[in-house]
Image (cartoon, helix red, strand yellow):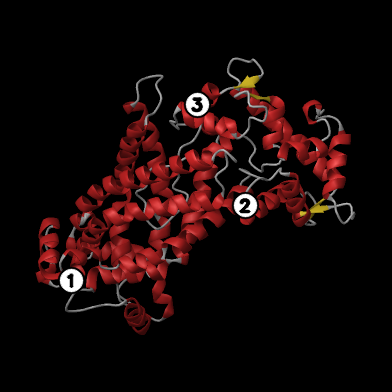
Amino acid sequence: MYNVIKGLVLTESRCWDPDSERSYQDLFDKLDTNKDGKVDVAELRAGLTAMGILPFNDSIEKLYCSCKIVSSGDENKDGGLDFNEFNKYLKEHEKKLRLTFKSLDKNNDGHIDASEIKQSLEELGMDITKEEAQTILQSMDIDGTMMVDWNEWRDHFLFNPAHNLNEIIRYWKHSSVLDIGESIAIPDEFTEEEKTSGGWWKQLAAGAMAGAVSRTGTAPLDRVKVFMQVHSSKSNRVTLLGGFKQMIKEGGVASLWRGNGVNVLKIAPETAIKFMAYEQYKKLLTPEGGKVQTHQRFMAGSLAGATAQSSIYPMEVMKTRLTLGKTGQYNGMFDCAKKILRKEGIKAFYKGYTPNMIGIIPYAGIDLAVYESLKNAWLSRYAKDTANPGILVLLGCGTISSTCGQLASYPLALLRTRMQAQATLEASDKSTMTGLMKGIMANEGFFGLYRGILPNFMKVIPAVSLSYVVYEYMKTGLGISK
């Protein structure tokens, strides 16, 4: 049905001249149903869906694609595309598709086959099987030849807001853009083109801003989590509502954001250090000229996380102390640092360091493994319709994998927090990592290692949503995407 409609609407699509405005004009007239000389989001969504050019089943996905097309081409910001804007968008988009097609056509025979797709994905750091490459190819292959020519490539991606296959595949690259308040995920992957063009730092900056907004928005839940981790026990139960009431009573509503400044401030240096260390570790672990395998990526990511955490760990301790501090106890981050140094010495800035470092391995390993499993499950089941997984799928996979990673490493995070806060605890509560764990298990049982897990889970969805929305806006603002 899609081919029939496309043959009727996109007149002579096999011989479509990209320089001919007649084909674009015919399509524009069909989409402009109210004949006002403009195509808005609703008309684009309805028209392209009816034509089969937007084959998504999810209405939110269709709306997102339509909005992206209109926002990309709407130069005068009037909410719609006139013919000049529509024509300019399609021509510029088609030029980008042509460049991408040529870059993927390794043997310059005018066709892309499954081996070329597999090779291109390997260059982007994604290892897929030949069968998975064929599945992706089938989503674009109209004539069933198991090869994609230029016409098939253009027809498939012309109305896809992604500029090229690299961008679509980058959707699937395991990314730390989805910020849930933890900084021990595998770092972002960047292509050689992004590294040489300087686009990587813009993405890191966008991610850092997204993380700052996300953490600020969920700071009250993070503070009550830390409060419950340190002070809640069988004999002194601290509920979610009780914790909020206690904190508001002690310091007012503004106290719910206590410690958030340090939590936000440490994002930028940690992100930069992690990225640079990750690139160096990948070079050390990968044979010269070889491809980075999944296990090498995990090892490099874990080592990079450990390096970054070691560099900014004193800020982690200060964040915990400020979060647990009472009104007037500290006059900001520097006052907190001076008081810790004067009363407890330099070693206090590395309390909880051991469980924090150990926690990187289960978090990063399970996060990456779950994400890869979910990704492969989706590709094997749904990639026949489209190679683009869509926003909801990506958010879902990222959220689930990060949550599983947190669930596995949470007991170590609790031990870290209690050790960081030892100066605020009674003398009987101060101990080593193993001593603390034995004490918790003896007094509170296994589930005592999961104190504060409820507010931690509650902040996942708003944190992910905030970080994704801000990241998209920041990418547009920095010129990464239009």
- 39 with respect to 95 (left or right): right
Q: Residue at x 81, y 26 (%)?
A: 15
Q: CA distance from mark 3 to mark 1?
A: 56 Å
Q: Residue at x 18, y 76 (%)?
A: 234
> How far across and how far down the image is residue 315, in percent?
32, 56
Q: Secondary structure at mark 1?
A: loop
In this figure, which residue is indicated by the disc labeled 3?
A: 118
* Label 1 CA crowd tier, 10 Å (few <14, some 14–19, many 20+): few
Q: Quadrant of residue 88?
A: top right
Cβ–Cβ below 8 Å for labels 2 and 3?
no
Q: Residue at x 37, y 56 (%)?
A: 403
> How far across and how far down the image is residue 418, in percent?
21, 64
The tag earlier along the polypeptide, 2 or 3, is 2
Q: Secondary structure at mark 2?
A: helix
- 259 with respect to 206 (left or right): left
Q: Amino acid at mark 2?
A: Glu
The tag earlier along the polypeptide, 2 or 1, is 2
Q: CA distance from mark 2 to mark 1?
A: 50 Å
Q: Amino acid at mark 3?
A: Lys
Q: Which sits in the foreground, 130 or 85?
A: 130
Q: CA distance from mark 2 to mark 3?
A: 26 Å
Quarter of the figure with the N terminus: top right
Q: Residue at x 47, y 66 (%)?
A: 217
Q: Amino acid at mark 1?
A: Leu
Cβ–Cβ below 8 Å for labels 2 and 1?
no
Residue 332 seen in render? no
Q: Secondary structure at mark 3?
A: helix
In this figure, which residue is indicated by the disc labeled 2?
A: 61
Q: Quadrant of residue 377?
A: top left
* Label 3 CA crowd tier, 10 Å (few <14, some 14–19, many 20+): many
In this figure, which residue is indicated by the disc labeled 1?
A: 425
